[in-house]
Image (cartoon, rainbow, N blue to C red):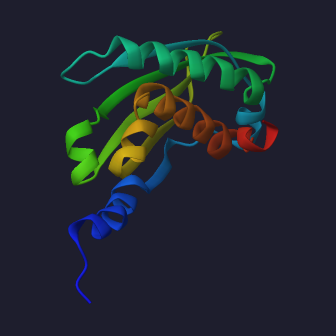
């Protein structure tokens, strides 16, 4: 039986519309001891961009998401500043993502600095990515800066402080 091009279109559209995958990783650069982690209270967050292209929207979204998350997971009794340096940010290409698939990525260092003495308590490398294809995947990543910033903050809380913010929501 011969099928028309119209009948094949819905199947192709379904494939283009529905594929997505997320990944994250947190690695220790200088691991803080468990006692130090329990004592950390983040009272300020600083975000810097170490990428060739400035991205004020990402910088603001990441700072906001980290401030919210740290209130919930870094609640010890020793004041710290969280310094985050964004080392890589790959933005979405909507046209490419619909037909071929695409990936967005956020990488950076997170360093906890004791405000009383200026010592580094711990430092970590984080990487979050989201890959997708199709119309729905492209629509899901239209707010890439916010989505990746939320995941970055959640992963930092979970991997360093042992607090799963997704369970608390």
Badge count: 0
Left or right of 114? Residue 152 is left
The answer to which of 79 and 132 lies nearer the viewer is 132
Q: Position of residue 81 (x, y in %)?
A: 59, 15
Left or right of 137? Residue 79 is right
- What is the quadrant of residue 70 in the picture? top right
Is 99 located above or below residue 11 in the figure? above
Q: Position of residue 10 (x, y in %)?
A: 36, 62
Q: Residue at x 26, y 37 (%)?
A: 94
The residue lying furthest to the bottom in this view is 1
User: Does the image show residue 93?
Assistant: no
User: Does the image show residue 66?
Assistant: yes
The answer to which of 149 and 109 lies nearer the viewer is 149
Task: Tell me the quadrant of the picture where the C terminus can be found.
Answer: top right
- What is the quadrant of residue 117 in the picture? top right
Q: Residue at x 40, y 60 (%)?
A: 14
Is 106 located above or below residue 116 in the figure? below
Q: Residue at x 37, y 50 (%)?
A: 131
Task: Tell me the quadrant of the picture where the N terminus can be found.
Answer: bottom left
Q: Residue at x 44, y 43 (%)?
A: 128
Q: Position of residue 50 (x, y in %)?
A: 28, 22
The answer to which of 12 and 98 lies nearer the viewer is 12
The answer to which of 76 and 71 lies nearer the viewer is 71
Q: Position of residue 73 (x, y in %)?
A: 74, 30
């Amino acid at each position: 039986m011969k099928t028309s091009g119209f009948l094949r279109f819905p199947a192709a559209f379904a494939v283009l519309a529905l594929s997505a995958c997320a990944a994250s990783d947190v690695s220790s650069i200088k691991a803080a001891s468990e006692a130090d982690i329990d004592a950390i209270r983040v009272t300020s967050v600083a975000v810097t961009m170490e990428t060739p292209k400035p991205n004020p929207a990402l910088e603001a979204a990441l700072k906001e998401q980290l401030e919210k998350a740290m209130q919930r997971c870094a609640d010890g009794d020793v004041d710290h500043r969280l310094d985050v340096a964004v080392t890589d940010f790959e933005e979405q290409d909507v046209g490419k993502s619909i037909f071929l698939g695409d990936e967005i990525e956020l990488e950076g260092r997170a360093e906890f600095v004791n405000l009383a003495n200026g010592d580094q308590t711990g430092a970590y490398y984080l990487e979050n990515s989201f890959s997708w294809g199709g119309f729905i995947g492209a629509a899901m990543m239209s707010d890439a800066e916010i989505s990746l910033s939320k995941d970055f903050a959640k992963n930092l809380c979970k991997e360093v402080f042992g607090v799963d913010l997704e369970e608390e929501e």
